[in-house]
Amino acid sequence: MTDATLAQGGSGKSKGFALPAINSSAIVMTLYLVFLLLPIYWLVNMSLKTNTEILGAFSLWPRNLTFDNYRVILTDPSWYMGYVNSLIYVVQNTVISISVALPAAYAFSRYNFMGDKHLFFWLLSNRMAPPAVFALPFFQLYSSIGLFDTHIAVALAHCLFNVPLAVWILEGFMRGVPREIDETAYIDGYSFPRFFVKIFMPLIASGIGVAAFFCFMFSWVELLLSRTLTSVDAKPIAATMTRTVSASGLDWGVLAAAGVLTIIPGALVIYFVRNYIAKGFALGRV
């Protein structure tokens, strides 16, 4: 074999095409996203079909596209008032929970008092209890004082679970703020309310955003208490979706459309507090 032949062979090898490297992390992430988005896509797919098509042949997309299911929800008061009622008591609960948890978390993070560890554990034990344990006591209490079937009744009932969670999250953030900031503010002449609102709360804004997010999501998806404590005037969308059985069976298309619309408020909340949530998972006790 001559030198020219060797040179040609070497040049041929250098001009060959190399197979692209397979990025395993990209494949895993793609499969994970498909796994997460598949139920949502299927829900949207069902919401754009008729009941006949849903119960008929299998199809990956609507063959006869229809928006009648959404039209039913947006024009029927028994449906769209469920969203209104849910938003009312969820916002009330979030505001009450954060307002109560802020001073409580500050006390746990800054002061030592008799029984503080036991009280903190008792708060968390309320969060561990299932809602079914408190459904009957709340029902009897609210029925006797005239709060049954009101928005504030559900909001206060959810505080039993959201306040401990908010205290636990905020206390972790507050411990990360040096005590010297409090002392410096007092030396500069700040009163406690002014210091707490203008200096301390901006420092733990990420924690407040995370706590508000979890309070909102728990109150939005909770079913047992909201269904037990309401009847007509304050019935939430979660309870409305469980009462769609008729003589002809379940209205699958309307239920799917209601499910799609139920996801939207949670998605909007995640979008607006996404930066706070990212910082909260990195810095706080979440």
Image (cartoon, rainbow, N blue to C red):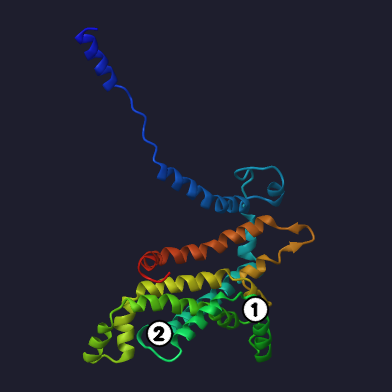
Side of 121 where 258 appears, left or right:
right
Residue in the picture at 62% in, 45% down: 62
Q: Please, what is the three-letter code of the amino acid marked with disc 2?
A: Phe
- Quick check: can you spot residue 206? yes
- Image position, residue 282 (x, y; %): 36, 65
Residue under label 2, please give it: 108
Disc number for residue 133: 1
- Image position, residue 92 (x, y; %): 51, 79
Q: Please, what is the three-letter code of the amino acid marked with disc 1?
A: Val
Residue ranking furthest to the right = 247
Q: Which quadrant is the C terminus positioned in? A: bottom left
- Quick check: can you spot residue 230? no
The answer to which image quadrant residue 259 occupies is bottom right
Secondary structure category for the residue under label 1: helix
Disc number for residue 157: none
Side of 111 where 38 appears, left or right:
right
* Foreground pick, 271 / 101: 101
Residue in the picture at 59% in, 74% down: 85
- Image position, residue 226 (x, y; %): 62, 75
Tag 1 near tag 2, CB within 8 Å: no
Instruction: Please determine whether, in this image, residue 54 is positioned above or below residue 17.
Output: below
Residue ranking furthest to the top = 1
Q: Which quadrant is the N terminus positioned in? A: top left
Q: CA distance from mark 1 to mark 2?
A: 27 Å
The answer to which image quadrant residue 73 occupies is bottom right
Residue in the picture at 49% in, 82% down: 96
Instruction: Please determine whether, in this image, residue 25 is positioned above or below residue 96.
Output: above
